[in-house]
Amino acid sequence: MVFQLTPEQEVIRDAVREFGEAEIRPVAAAYEDDQRYPADLLEAAAALDLVAPHVPEAYGGAGMDAISTLLVTEELWRADPGVGGSIAAADFGTGMLLEYGEEWMCETWLPKITAGETPIATGISEPAHGSNVAGMETRAEKSEARSASEQSGEAAEKDGDEWVIDGQKMWITNGTVADVAIVMAKTSPGDGHRGITAFLTPTDVDGYEATTITNKLGIEAQDTAEIVLDGLRVPDENVVGEVDRGFYQLMDFFGPARADVAAQATGVAQAALEEAIDYAGEREQFGGPIADFQAIGHTIAEMATNVEAARSLTYRAGAALESGDDALATKLASMAKLFASERAVEVTDDALQVHGGAGYVADHPVERFYRDARITKLYDGTSEIQKNIIADHLL
Ligand SMILES: Cc1cc2nc3c(=O)[nH]c(=O)nc-3n(C[C@H](O)[C@H](O)[C@H](O)COP(=O)(O)OP(=O)(O)OC[C@H]3O[C@@H](n4cnc5c(N)ncnc54)[C@H](O)[C@@H]3O)c2cc1C
């Protein structure tokens, strides 16, 4: 149980906060308006060890513990969910590499990611299959099997050292800006969740075509892509983990990823709370600051309580991840994601309400926070899916 940050964790939080306020806040609106990926800020953040900070020092990371890693995400999102969020999301896949990847994969890619040279993408969702991961249709076949099935009559190519991947991935964070991606595909299509495999692929190869999805509701500086995989060839050595074990690997991957979304939600809610407190002190109606109205005070009290509760649950999930108790960590990560994301949507809405009409236009960051917070209820498993997971643990 964690009641207080360690002095080291406080130093980390303060350093990210300083970076966020000096480097991200002043430029965030411009990046968001232009829907521009902040590659330059990714490098600046990497110089301070803020990109993929959980990665061990041997691969260029900072080797941070789970709670420190969550603090980094929280503060980056407090600065700005689109720009700071791009920096936090640059590691979306490193957990899978560290846990299941071969040494050469980690040595080749993790130093580039931690240096801010490239983010990593992970392609799970598809146009027709989001929540139902096991339903994915993207197929990977050994080249000999494919040759045999495609070229009946002709001599089949019998090398068998490559996988050929065909399919489509949807909503993939970093899809167009990452030099490397983990792609999930069916290798035993008749076996449902027991037939999925993870593949590592560079993105500058034939058969990988990513297109940016524009006009999102929020987190506009983040890169989100649709990816067409058309005969993408991947050597056998690029299987991450074990063939047909990808679904189980994903379940491990999602624990820290969901705690991370809880930290994102806490960060944007904290930012909205601070804006509301400032505005309530400045804005005057009926001859005094609106902060003097009990209704505003109560709203801010509820917002602050929700943020604090979300933060506590998020850190508790972090402590469970650190403890190695996988069952507890999975449950708490889902609870933290569910609670923090639902509260973030409420708190950012409250902040907008405190701003009155001024909150409805882009002049105030609360307008952006209100839109940005919404994604946390959707990705890495919707709120409904988190409830299913939590219920499964309890019943
Ligand atoms: C900006 C953004 C970034 C993303 N980044 C990534 C990424 O990097 N990689 C990646 O693979 N994916 C990514 N996603 C995809 C995201 O994880 C999915 O959108 C999400 O899992 C939901 O899937 P879906 O959109 O297909 O919705 P659906 O699965 O079609 O769900 C529609 C509705 O039905 C509900 N529902 C579905 N099944 C159940 C059930 N069993 N019980 C109760 N309710 C249910 C859902 O909760 C939801 O309300 C991203 C999405 C967005 C918008």
Image (cartoon, rainbow, N blue to C red):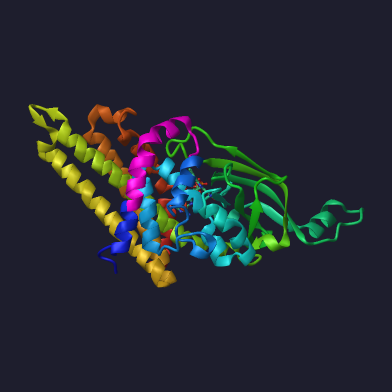
Q: Which residue, as the protein is rendered here, is positioned at the far front?
A: 47
Image check: 347 left or right of 385? Answer: left
Which residue corresponds to the image point at 24% horizontal and 42% vertical from the top-left?
A: 274
Q: Give the magenta part as a residue range.
A: 15-38
Q: Nearer the viewer, residue 168 or 359?
A: 359
Counting the numbered discs, the total is 0
**Residue nearest the observer in this picture, 46 or 329:** 46
- Residue 393 place in picture, x, y as percent: 41, 67
Please check the rendered image and state whether residue 47 is part of the magenta-colored stretch, yes or no: no
Q: Quadrant of residue 212?
A: top right
Q: Where is residue 347 in the image (x, y as percent from the top left)?
A: 28, 44
184 relative to 173 in the view: left or right: right
Evaluate whether residue 250 shows in this view.
Answer: no
Identify whether 203 is placed above or below 353.
below
Q: In which quarter of the image is the C terminus?
A: bottom left
Q: Is the magenta stretch mostly helix, strand or loop?
A: helix
Image-quadrant location for residue 104? bottom right
Quarter the N terminus occupies: bottom left
In percent of the image, x 25 and y 65: which residue is there? Answer: 3
Which residue occupies 16% across, 39% down? 296
Would residue 24 be counted in the magenta stretch? Answer: yes
Residue 203 location (% of width, % of height)? 65, 47
Q: Nearer the viewer, residue 126 or 361?
A: 361
Q: Could you tell whether 97 is left or right of 317 in the image? A: right
